Amino acid sequence: MSYESDIVPILSANCYSCHGTNTNSGSMGIILEGYSNIKAKADAGTLIGVITHASGFPAMPKDGPKLSDCNINKIRAWINQGTQDN
């Protein structure tokens, strides 16, 4: 999986409207735009927890439908491949 071609489009379409750099410092102070920001959430396990609606994590996107299984699997694969900036 490529960060630029596979992951950024998913995040841009589903996350940046609330968690982007130009959205009033991100919802709840969480900014996902930019590689270092998303890598930190991916490495901590938070990203998978929120997008899979796992117990103990706030379901994201907030007030929106869960990401498709395909998009979740792309993000999971990117994480499993070492969250590369590629």
Image (cartoon, rainbow, N blue to C red):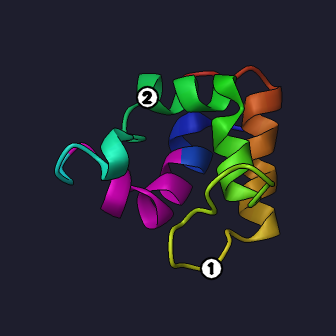
Number of numbered markers: 2
Q: Per the image, is 12 magenta?
A: yes
Query: Relative to residue 85, is residue 28 depicted above or below?
Result: below
| Residue sitting at the far front | 56
Residue 9 in percent (x, y) is at 50, 56
Name the side, left or right, on which 78 lies relative to 11: right
The numbered dot on residue 18 is none
The type of residue carrying mark 2 is: Asn
The numbered dot on residue 37 is 2
The numbered dot on residue 65 is 1
User: Residue at (79%, 54%) from the top-left corner?
Assistant: 54
The alpha-carbon separation of the residues under discs 1 and 2 comes to 23 Å
Q: Per the image, is 54 magenta?
A: no
User: Residue at (67%, 68%) from the top-left corner?
Assistant: 67
Camera-side residue of 83 and 20: 20
Residue 86 appears in the rendering: no
Q: Which residues are magenta?
A: 8-21
Camera-side residue of 83 and 52: 52
Name the side, left or right, on which 39 lies relative to 69: left
Query: Relative to residue 75, is residue 42 depicted above or below?
Result: above
Query: Relative to residue 65, is residue 68 depicted above or below?
Result: above
User: Residue at (72%, 44%) from the top-left corner?
Assistant: 48
The type of residue carrying mark 1 is: Pro
User: Residue at (81%, 66%) from the top-left corner?
Assistant: 69
Disc 2 element: helix
Name the side, left or right, on which 44 lies relative to 37: right
Camera-side residue of 11 and 48: 48
**Which is nearer the N-term, disc 1 or disc 2?**
2
